[in-house]
Amino acid sequence: MKFGIIRFPGSNCDEDAYHAVADVLGETATYLWHKSHDLEGADVLLLPGGFSYGDYLRAGAIARFSPIMREVAAHARRGAPVIGICNGFQILCEAGLLPGALLRNAGLQYVSEPVRLRVENADTMFTNRYERGQVLRMPVAHGEGRYVADAATLDRLEGEGHVVFRYVDVEGATTDDASPNGSMRGIAGIVSAEGNVLGMMPHPERAVEEVLGSTDGLGLFQSMLAGVSA
Amino acid sequence: MSRFRVSVHIVPRKGILDPQGKAVTEALHTLGFSDVADARVGRHVLLDVAAADATSAGAVVREMCDRLLANPVTEDYEIAGVEGI
């Protein structure tokens, strides 16, 4: 399976994603420059973390106009997998491929720390290697990760199982303290209505080897292998 | 076509937590400005636009706000002024 890792000016988790896919999973990965219109046959598109366009105006607001985003939208419309991690999630929201928005952390500070995530839906192409209710450890590193949407959108996301990951505390409970950023309803990751676009603030690509402190992110990439080839 | 300076205020929507505004409010209280009940911190954009008249200059900036300058999910905007230059 081929992963296309999109590089925007200011992306800085692109090499981590490449390492996770190519070196750890042993799959094919290629970098796609944001000005390109050629997806080079990639099966999965990955929008990595970073500070595309310096987060000017709003995080992701300018990157969504990058030429390759037309191809990303077309890929998503075909039902093919698109994953946005951190800044990638912000870009997917700005592009309207996912609902809602990501605002400045409630505590105002940039947060870089390991968090706990509960898998809320294990029936997606991104989470089928996990179990519902399983708690994962992986890092977050962001200043603008507070997920916000109107109440109707939140209810729809919850009702249709599109909330995929939620921040939880040591006890596995969703509390205000469990969330590093004050996200509404503790939301850490969501999928689109069709289920093929995933956005999440935590970094699964930084949790794929014991030396990184956690291997809990591996399941996400392995889920995609199973999901897409099936 | 004439040129207009259009001024836009973009602010976090009421009801959406604005931690920056909250921090500013608290800092003002620390300085002794106890009469401040609330502060919201947004953005001010000044655009130099060519348009047939002031009305169409305002209209095109409104469209810019809807499509780029403001986030429709979390922000409100208002055209604060349109003046010929």
Image (tube, grey):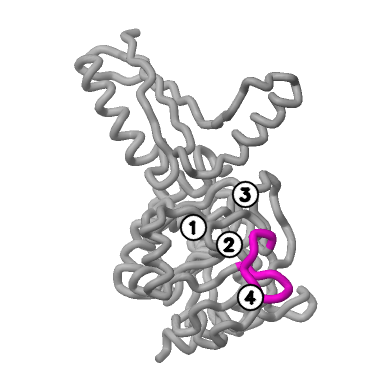
Q: Nearer the viewer, residue A123 or A89?
A: A123
Do discs 1 and 2 share a chain?
yes
Secondary structure under badge 3? loop
**Where is B33 relative to A72, above or below?**
above
The span from disc 1 to disc 4 (Cα, nearest Å) is: 19 Å
Residue located 49% across and 44% down the image: B16
Q: Amino acid at mark 1?
A: Trp
**Where is A178 relative to A215, above or below?**
above
The span from disc 4 to disc 3 (Cα, nearest Å) is: 27 Å
Q: Earlier in the sequence, mark 1 or mark 4?
A: 4
Q: Is there CB contact under 8 Å for labels 2 and 3? A: no
Which residue lies under the disc numbered 3? Answer: A105
Category of crowding for the residue at label 3, using alpha-carbon neighbours closer than 10 angstroms: few (below 14), some (14–19), many (at least 20): many
Q: Amino acid at mark 4?
A: Ala
- Is residue A117 in view from this perspective? yes
Q: Is there CB contact under 8 Å for labels 1 and 3? A: no
Which residue lies under the disc numbered 4? Answer: A20
Q: Is there CB contact under 8 Å for labels 4 and 3? A: no
Do discs 2 and 3 share a chain?
yes
Picture disc at residue A33 = 1
Location of residue A149 (image quadrant): bottom left
Using residue A106 as the reference point, say whether residue A4 is left or right of it: left
The span from disc 2 to disc 3 (Cα, nearest Å) is: 12 Å
Which span is picked out in magenta? A167-177
Q: Earlier in the sequence, mark 4 or mark 3?
A: 4
Q: Earlier in the sequence, mark 1 or mark 3?
A: 1
Residue A59 within the segment the image draws in magenta: no
Which residue lies under the disc numbered 2? Answer: A201
